[in-house]
Amino acid sequence: MFKKIGFIGIGVMGKSMAAHLMDAYGPILIYSRTKSKAEDLISRGAIWKDSVKEIAQEADLIFTIVGYPSDVESVYLSEDGLVKNAKEGTFFCDMTTTTPSLEMKIAEQADKRGCKFFDAPVSGGDVGARNATLTIMLGGDKDSLKDILPYLEKMGKSINYMGKAGMGQHTKMCNQIVISGTMIGVSEALVYGKKAGLDVPAMIDAIRPGAAGCWTLDNLAPRVVKNDFAPGFMIDHFIKDMKIALEESKAMNLDLKGLALVEKLYEKLQEEGYGKDGTQALVKAVEATAKEV
Protein backbone atom coordinates (compact mmCIF):
# COMPACT_ATOMS: atom_id res chain seq x y z
CA MET A 1 0.00 0.00 0.00
CA PHE A 2 1.28 3.46 -0.90
CA LYS A 3 1.77 5.93 1.96
CA LYS A 4 0.86 9.13 0.14
CA ILE A 5 -1.37 9.55 -2.91
CA GLY A 6 -1.16 12.61 -5.13
CA PHE A 7 -3.75 13.74 -7.66
CA ILE A 8 -3.16 16.41 -10.31
CA GLY A 9 -6.06 17.83 -12.32
CA ILE A 10 -9.27 18.64 -10.44
CA GLY A 11 -11.67 19.15 -13.34
CA VAL A 12 -15.02 17.70 -14.40
CA MET A 13 -13.60 14.18 -14.24
CA GLY A 14 -10.72 14.50 -11.82
CA LYS A 15 -12.74 15.99 -8.98
CA SER A 16 -14.96 12.92 -8.66
CA MET A 17 -12.09 10.49 -9.21
CA ALA A 18 -10.00 12.11 -6.48
CA ALA A 19 -13.02 12.06 -4.16
CA HIS A 20 -13.37 8.29 -4.57
CA LEU A 21 -9.71 7.82 -3.64
CA MET A 22 -10.24 9.98 -0.56
CA ASP A 23 -13.29 7.93 0.44
CA ALA A 24 -11.16 4.80 0.34
CA TYR A 25 -7.77 5.98 1.58
CA GLY A 26 -8.30 9.23 3.48
CA PRO A 27 -6.70 12.62 2.72
CA ILE A 28 -4.68 12.85 -0.49
CA LEU A 29 -2.39 15.53 -1.91
CA ILE A 30 -3.98 17.54 -4.70
CA TYR A 31 -2.96 20.20 -7.21
CA SER A 32 -4.78 21.92 -10.06
CA ARG A 33 -4.12 25.09 -12.02
CA THR A 34 -7.32 26.61 -10.63
CA LYS A 35 -7.46 26.19 -6.86
CA SER A 36 -11.11 27.23 -6.62
CA LYS A 37 -12.11 24.00 -8.41
CA ALA A 38 -10.58 22.05 -5.56
CA GLU A 39 -12.27 23.85 -2.66
CA ASP A 40 -14.86 21.09 -2.12
CA LEU A 41 -12.13 18.47 -1.79
CA ILE A 42 -10.05 20.72 0.47
CA SER A 43 -13.07 21.21 2.74
CA ARG A 44 -13.30 17.41 2.97
CA GLY A 45 -9.68 17.07 4.04
CA ALA A 46 -7.64 16.99 0.83
CA ILE A 47 -4.19 18.54 1.27
CA TRP A 48 -3.55 21.32 -1.25
CA LYS A 49 -0.07 21.67 -2.73
CA ASP A 50 1.07 24.74 -4.64
CA SER A 51 2.89 22.95 -7.44
CA VAL A 52 3.43 19.74 -9.36
CA LYS A 53 6.94 19.66 -7.93
CA GLU A 54 5.64 19.52 -4.34
CA ILE A 55 3.39 16.59 -5.23
CA ALA A 56 6.36 14.81 -6.82
CA GLN A 57 8.54 15.28 -3.77
CA GLU A 58 5.97 13.93 -1.28
CA ALA A 59 3.70 11.37 -2.93
CA ASP A 60 4.65 7.83 -3.88
CA LEU A 61 1.58 7.19 -6.08
CA ILE A 62 0.52 10.03 -8.38
CA PHE A 63 -2.52 10.22 -10.66
CA THR A 64 -2.89 12.87 -13.36
CA ILE A 65 -5.79 13.86 -15.58
CA VAL A 66 -5.12 17.17 -17.30
CA GLY A 67 -6.16 18.78 -20.58
CA TYR A 68 -3.92 18.45 -23.59
CA PRO A 69 -0.73 16.63 -24.62
CA SER A 70 1.25 19.82 -23.96
CA ASP A 71 -0.10 19.82 -20.38
CA VAL A 72 0.87 16.18 -19.90
CA GLU A 73 4.37 16.85 -21.21
CA SER A 74 4.80 19.84 -18.91
CA VAL A 75 3.46 18.04 -15.82
CA TYR A 76 5.74 15.05 -16.33
CA LEU A 77 8.85 16.19 -18.20
CA SER A 78 9.51 19.85 -17.34
CA GLU A 79 12.28 20.85 -14.92
CA ASP A 80 9.69 21.25 -12.16
CA GLY A 81 7.72 18.24 -13.32
CA LEU A 82 7.01 14.87 -11.81
CA VAL A 83 9.72 12.71 -13.31
CA LYS A 84 12.69 14.91 -12.44
CA ASN A 85 11.51 15.55 -8.89
CA ALA A 86 10.02 12.23 -7.81
CA LYS A 87 11.54 9.78 -5.37
CA GLU A 88 12.83 6.49 -6.67
CA GLY A 89 10.07 3.89 -6.64
CA THR A 90 7.25 6.36 -7.28
CA PHE A 91 4.32 5.12 -9.37
CA PHE A 92 2.74 7.46 -11.94
CA CYS A 93 -0.62 6.91 -13.60
CA ASP A 94 -1.68 9.32 -16.35
CA MET A 95 -5.43 9.15 -16.99
CA THR A 96 -5.46 11.97 -19.54
CA THR A 97 -6.27 11.13 -23.14
CA THR A 98 -3.10 12.04 -25.00
CA THR A 99 -0.72 10.75 -27.68
CA PRO A 100 0.62 7.19 -27.38
CA SER A 101 4.12 8.34 -28.36
CA LEU A 102 4.24 10.85 -25.50
CA GLU A 103 3.24 8.20 -22.96
CA MET A 104 5.99 5.91 -24.27
CA LYS A 105 8.50 8.75 -23.86
CA ILE A 106 7.37 9.45 -20.29
CA ALA A 107 7.53 5.74 -19.43
CA GLU A 108 11.12 5.60 -20.70
CA GLN A 109 12.17 8.63 -18.65
CA ALA A 110 10.36 7.35 -15.55
CA ASP A 111 12.13 4.01 -15.86
CA LYS A 112 15.50 5.77 -15.89
CA ARG A 113 14.55 7.39 -12.57
CA GLY A 114 13.60 4.04 -11.06
CA CYS A 115 9.89 4.85 -11.24
CA LYS A 116 6.89 3.09 -12.79
CA PHE A 117 4.58 4.73 -15.32
CA PHE A 118 1.14 3.65 -16.50
CA ASP A 119 -1.09 5.28 -19.08
CA ALA A 120 -4.73 4.75 -18.12
CA PRO A 121 -7.14 6.85 -20.17
CA VAL A 122 -10.79 6.50 -19.22
CA SER A 123 -14.23 6.42 -20.80
CA GLY A 124 -17.59 7.05 -19.21
CA GLY A 125 -17.74 10.82 -18.92
CA ASP A 126 -18.82 12.81 -15.91
CA VAL A 127 -21.46 10.20 -15.03
CA GLY A 128 -18.89 7.41 -14.93
CA ALA A 129 -16.52 9.53 -12.88
CA ARG A 130 -19.22 10.38 -10.32
CA ASN A 131 -20.44 6.80 -10.04
CA ALA A 132 -16.98 5.18 -10.10
CA THR A 133 -18.04 3.15 -13.14
CA LEU A 134 -15.36 4.34 -15.57
CA THR A 135 -13.84 2.06 -18.16
CA ILE A 136 -10.06 2.23 -17.79
CA MET A 137 -7.65 1.25 -20.57
CA LEU A 138 -4.29 0.46 -19.04
CA GLY A 139 -0.78 0.31 -20.45
CA GLY A 140 2.46 -0.27 -18.55
CA ASP A 141 4.55 -2.84 -16.71
CA LYS A 142 2.41 -5.96 -16.28
CA ASP A 143 4.39 -7.19 -13.29
CA SER A 144 3.52 -4.00 -11.37
CA LEU A 145 -0.17 -4.12 -12.26
CA LYS A 146 -1.12 -5.72 -8.94
CA ASP A 147 0.24 -2.71 -7.03
CA ILE A 148 -1.91 -0.12 -8.77
CA LEU A 149 -5.04 -2.15 -9.48
CA PRO A 150 -6.77 -1.65 -6.09
CA TYR A 151 -6.61 2.13 -6.56
CA LEU A 152 -7.99 2.01 -10.09
CA GLU A 153 -10.84 -0.15 -8.83
CA LYS A 154 -12.00 2.76 -6.66
CA MET A 155 -12.58 4.82 -9.82
CA GLY A 156 -13.72 2.34 -12.43
CA LYS A 157 -15.60 -0.92 -12.86
CA SER A 158 -13.94 -2.16 -16.05
CA ILE A 159 -10.14 -2.17 -16.00
CA ASN A 160 -8.48 -3.60 -19.07
CA TYR A 161 -4.73 -4.26 -19.37
CA MET A 162 -3.76 -3.62 -23.00
CA GLY A 163 0.03 -4.03 -23.02
CA LYS A 164 3.07 -1.79 -22.70
CA ALA A 165 2.87 1.95 -22.02
CA GLY A 166 1.06 3.71 -24.85
CA MET A 167 -1.29 0.84 -25.59
CA GLY A 168 -3.89 2.28 -23.23
CA GLN A 169 -3.92 5.41 -25.39
CA HIS A 170 -4.22 3.43 -28.61
CA THR A 171 -7.24 1.66 -27.09
CA LYS A 172 -8.75 5.03 -26.13
CA MET A 173 -8.39 6.16 -29.73
CA CYS A 174 -10.48 3.17 -30.80
CA ASN A 175 -13.01 4.20 -28.14
CA GLN A 176 -13.20 7.76 -29.46
CA ILE A 177 -13.59 6.58 -33.06
CA VAL A 178 -16.62 4.52 -32.01
CA ILE A 179 -18.05 7.45 -30.04
CA SER A 180 -17.72 9.79 -33.02
CA GLY A 181 -19.82 7.39 -35.08
CA THR A 182 -22.49 6.82 -32.46
CA MET A 183 -22.67 10.54 -31.70
CA ILE A 184 -23.52 11.50 -35.26
CA GLY A 185 -25.93 8.58 -35.56
CA VAL A 186 -27.81 9.59 -32.42
CA SER A 187 -27.79 13.27 -33.42
CA GLU A 188 -29.24 12.52 -36.86
CA ALA A 189 -31.89 10.26 -35.32
CA LEU A 190 -32.97 13.06 -32.96
CA VAL A 191 -33.18 15.59 -35.80
CA TYR A 192 -35.08 13.11 -38.00
CA GLY A 193 -37.48 12.18 -35.19
CA LYS A 194 -38.27 15.80 -34.38
CA LYS A 195 -38.86 16.65 -38.06
CA ALA A 196 -41.14 13.61 -38.48
CA GLY A 197 -43.28 14.82 -35.60
CA LEU A 198 -42.46 11.98 -33.24
CA ASP A 199 -42.63 12.22 -29.47
CA VAL A 200 -38.83 12.24 -29.25
CA PRO A 201 -38.49 10.90 -25.66
CA ALA A 202 -40.89 8.07 -26.58
CA MET A 203 -38.84 7.38 -29.71
CA ILE A 204 -35.66 7.13 -27.62
CA ASP A 205 -37.37 4.68 -25.24
CA ALA A 206 -38.61 2.62 -28.18
CA ILE A 207 -35.26 2.14 -29.90
CA ARG A 208 -33.06 1.94 -26.80
CA PRO A 209 -33.65 -1.78 -26.04
CA GLY A 210 -32.88 -2.87 -29.61
CA ALA A 211 -29.77 -2.90 -31.79
CA ALA A 212 -29.54 0.90 -31.63
CA GLY A 213 -28.93 0.77 -27.89
CA CYS A 214 -25.74 2.54 -26.79
CA TRP A 215 -24.30 4.72 -24.02
CA THR A 216 -24.83 7.89 -26.07
CA LEU A 217 -28.52 7.13 -26.55
CA ASP A 218 -28.98 6.33 -22.85
CA ASN A 219 -27.06 9.26 -21.38
CA LEU A 220 -26.79 12.10 -23.88
CA ALA A 221 -29.95 11.92 -26.00
CA PRO A 222 -32.16 12.76 -22.97
CA ARG A 223 -29.96 15.80 -22.30
CA VAL A 224 -30.48 17.02 -25.86
CA VAL A 225 -34.26 16.69 -25.46
CA LYS A 226 -34.02 18.97 -22.40
CA ASN A 227 -31.71 21.42 -24.25
CA ASP A 228 -29.03 20.54 -21.72
CA PHE A 229 -25.66 21.02 -23.38
CA ALA A 230 -23.59 21.23 -20.21
CA PRO A 231 -20.38 19.25 -20.60
CA GLY A 232 -19.90 15.77 -19.37
CA PHE A 233 -17.09 15.90 -21.88
CA MET A 234 -16.30 19.17 -23.66
CA ILE A 235 -16.24 19.59 -27.43
CA ASP A 236 -12.80 21.22 -27.14
CA HIS A 237 -11.40 18.07 -25.55
CA PHE A 238 -13.17 15.71 -27.96
CA ILE A 239 -11.72 17.59 -30.93
CA LYS A 240 -8.29 17.12 -29.34
CA ASP A 241 -8.92 13.38 -29.08
CA MET A 242 -10.18 13.07 -32.65
CA LYS A 243 -7.17 14.96 -33.98
CA ILE A 244 -4.87 12.54 -32.14
CA ALA A 245 -6.76 9.60 -33.64
CA LEU A 246 -6.53 11.10 -37.13
CA GLU A 247 -2.80 11.78 -36.72
CA GLU A 248 -2.16 8.24 -35.46
CA SER A 249 -4.25 6.84 -38.32
CA LYS A 250 -2.25 8.83 -40.86
CA ALA A 251 0.99 7.51 -39.36
CA MET A 252 -0.35 3.97 -39.94
CA ASN A 253 -1.43 4.83 -43.51
CA LEU A 254 -5.12 4.69 -42.61
CA ASP A 255 -7.74 7.09 -43.98
CA LEU A 256 -10.73 7.16 -41.62
CA LYS A 257 -13.29 9.22 -43.53
CA GLY A 258 -16.12 8.88 -41.02
CA LEU A 259 -13.96 10.16 -38.17
CA ALA A 260 -12.71 13.03 -40.33
CA LEU A 261 -16.29 14.07 -41.17
CA VAL A 262 -17.40 14.17 -37.54
CA GLU A 263 -14.26 16.06 -36.53
CA LYS A 264 -15.03 18.75 -39.13
CA LEU A 265 -18.59 19.15 -37.82
CA TYR A 266 -17.27 19.59 -34.29
CA GLU A 267 -14.69 22.10 -35.52
CA LYS A 268 -17.55 24.13 -37.02
CA LEU A 269 -19.26 24.19 -33.63
CA GLN A 270 -16.01 25.22 -31.97
CA GLU A 271 -15.62 28.11 -34.41
CA GLU A 272 -19.16 29.20 -33.56
CA GLY A 273 -18.33 29.38 -29.86
CA TYR A 274 -19.65 26.02 -28.63
CA GLY A 275 -16.29 24.55 -27.64
CA LYS A 276 -17.13 24.48 -23.93
CA ASP A 277 -20.44 22.68 -24.52
CA GLY A 278 -20.81 18.95 -24.11
CA THR A 279 -20.32 16.62 -27.05
CA GLN A 280 -24.10 16.18 -27.34
CA ALA A 281 -24.17 19.67 -28.92
CA LEU A 282 -23.25 17.96 -32.19
CA VAL A 283 -26.99 17.94 -32.81
CA LYS A 284 -26.72 21.70 -33.49
CA ALA A 285 -24.30 21.09 -36.35
CA VAL A 286 -26.47 18.27 -37.71
CA GLU A 287 -29.56 20.49 -37.62
CA ALA A 288 -27.72 23.27 -39.44
CA THR A 289 -26.36 20.89 -42.08
CA ALA A 290 -29.74 19.24 -42.58
CA LYS A 291 -31.38 22.64 -43.24
CA GLU A 292 -28.86 23.33 -46.01
CA VAL A 293 -30.34 20.53 -48.16
Image: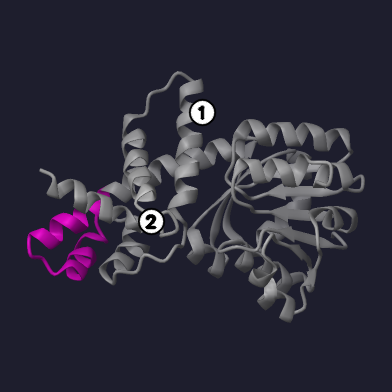
Q: Quadrant of the N terminus?
A: bottom right
Residue 128: give x, y in percent of width and height.
Answer: 51, 63
Q: Which residue lies furthest to the bottom in this view?
A: 43
Q: Name the residue under label 2.
A: 274
- Residue ID at (69%, 60%): 33
> Does dot 2 land on a helix, a strand or a loop?
loop
> Relative to 188, does residue 101 appear above or below in the rendering?
above
Residue 186 visible somewhere in the drawing: no
Q: Residue at x 59, y 41 (%)?
A: 98
* Residue type, numbered disc 2: Tyr
* Residue linked to disc 1: 248
Mark toward the start of the polypeptide (1 vs 2): 1
From the image, state whether disc 1 or disc 2 is nearer to you: 2
Q: Specify whether residue 193 is painted magenta.
A: yes
Quarter of the picture containing the C terminus is top left
Front residue of 46 and 24: 46
- Is residue 42 shown to the viewer in this render? yes
Image position of 235 (left or right of 14):
left
Task: Please tell me whether the stretch drawn in magenta is mainly helix, strand or loop.
Answer: helix
Query: Based on the displayed image, in which of its 4 quarters is residue 228 positioned?
Result: bottom left
Task: Indicate yes or no whether the magenta region holds residue 125.
Answer: no
Q: How many marks?
A: 2
Q: How crowded is mark 2: few (under 14 residues within 10 Å), some or many (20 or more)?
A: many
Extreme right residue here? 88
- In this rendered view, identify the residue nearer to me: 1 or 123: 123
Q: What stretch is highlighted in magenta?
A: 185-211
